[in-house]
Image (tube, grey):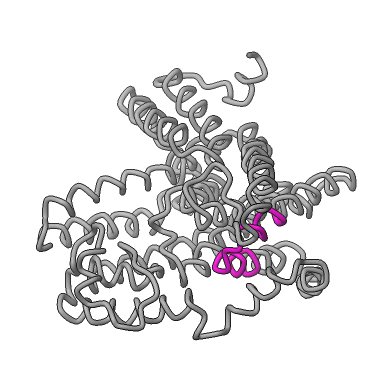
Amino acid sequence: MSRFREWLGDERGPGAGAMRVARGCLVVLAFAVPFSIAITEAALVTGLVALLVARRRGRPWRFASSPLDWACLAIVASWIVSSAFSPEPFGAFVHTRKLYALGLIYLAAEGFREPGLRARFVPLVLAGATVTALVGFLIYAVKVRNDPSYRLQSLLSNQMTSGGVLAATALWALGQVTVGRIGRRLAYGVMCALLGAALALTQTRSHWLGFAAGAAALLVARVPRAWWTLPLAAIAFRLAAPARLVARLASIVDPHEPGNQGRLSMWRSGWDIFRERPLTGAGVQDLLALYRKHKYPDATFEAGHFHNNVVQFAVSAGVLGLAAFLFWCVAGYRQLLRARRAATGEDRALVASALGVFTALMVSGMFDFTFGDAEVVYHSYLALGLSLALLPGRTEVDAHGGR
């Protein structure tokens, strides 16, 4: 218990108890986010309430204000406007409740101001990720005997979500490989390899690409001279992976592969829907019924979203929503790059991982609606919160004349 208190910091003053609760919830969330959305959501809601109680009792925000605040507000405003003008406003307004999850950015920004908690964040995430990977391997070993096409899923809702979570957690591990003693680096390297193997077995090509892009961003930010490890890893995968995984990778560039063809057809339908309601969109809700009305004959599957973040925002929230999302992406990168310049010591590895995780979301989001997948996008919220925590806080900025 005393060690747990050490993680939460020696908080004093107004709202100290509530702030310790908020940090405790962040600890639980970091461990649970790779394997349980129910525990994660409970921890998030409780942590946000505790954070607001601390503020109400007089504790000031300590994280820095930034354009990311306005970007988050822009997304909220665009979703509300879209819902108001939606053909089904009630259903659309119900879906806007999901935006409370953006509060995770600020829960993390405030919680990670405590160095002890920040230092233990990656071990907590990787402890939860180990549960996901090991359970996934066990289920895979049993099911693949009867179904050779089986894709690793583990405890999460589907293979796509599992792939996104494993890609993000592998990137958190990869950042730690670049810092510390050789034994520590090897331990994190083994963890990264374990999570990478589980990611490979999900056969989620979008998250393979996301991980590759995130790893490249991480290495450029942290150890540019290690760029050669990426093509080496690709060659190793080509030589060691089973033939069906190699074929799955090669299918990325095949426009006639059923998954690729289905996405291309779906995006054409999305364009048709967008042209009907270009300003405010069709509403932030499940769009399966609307998609069926605009589906082309060459469609290979159906879904209530459009397997692309940009297309999804354009269709559901129109030009206003798309502009808000792009503003959020730019503001997020800006914060991550500012944090990279400000970070010192082992925090540099954390920021490099955060940059990699956010990049992975952007790249895999070209082929899946990752912004709408809570288990996946929460890693990006944690990354952005971490970047805010490492920047000079509000009191520090004021003390230095607004710098």
Q: Vertical placement of 346 versus 364: above or below? A: above
Residue drawn at the location 62% of the way across and 69% of the way down:
213
Q: Quadrant of residue 323?
A: bottom left
What residue occupies the far top of the structure in this picture? 1
| Image x and y of residue 274, in percent | 22, 77
Residue drawn at the location 30% of the way across and 26% of the way down:
56
Characterize the magenta stretch by its predominant secondary structure. Answer: helix
Instruction: Return the residue nearer the eye: 72 or 89.
Output: 89
Instruction: Return the residue nearer the eye: 238 or 38.
Output: 238
Q: Vertical placement of 1 versus 329: above or below? A: above
Say left or right for 317 vs 3.
left
Is 138 included in the stretch rendered in magenta?
no
Q: Which residues are magenta?
A: 196-213
| Image x and y of residue 177, in percent | 78, 52
Residue drawn at the location 47% of the way across and 71% of the way down:
367
| Image x and y of residue 257, in percent | 52, 80
| Image x and y of residue 344, in percent | 69, 50
Image quadrant in which the N terminus is located: top right
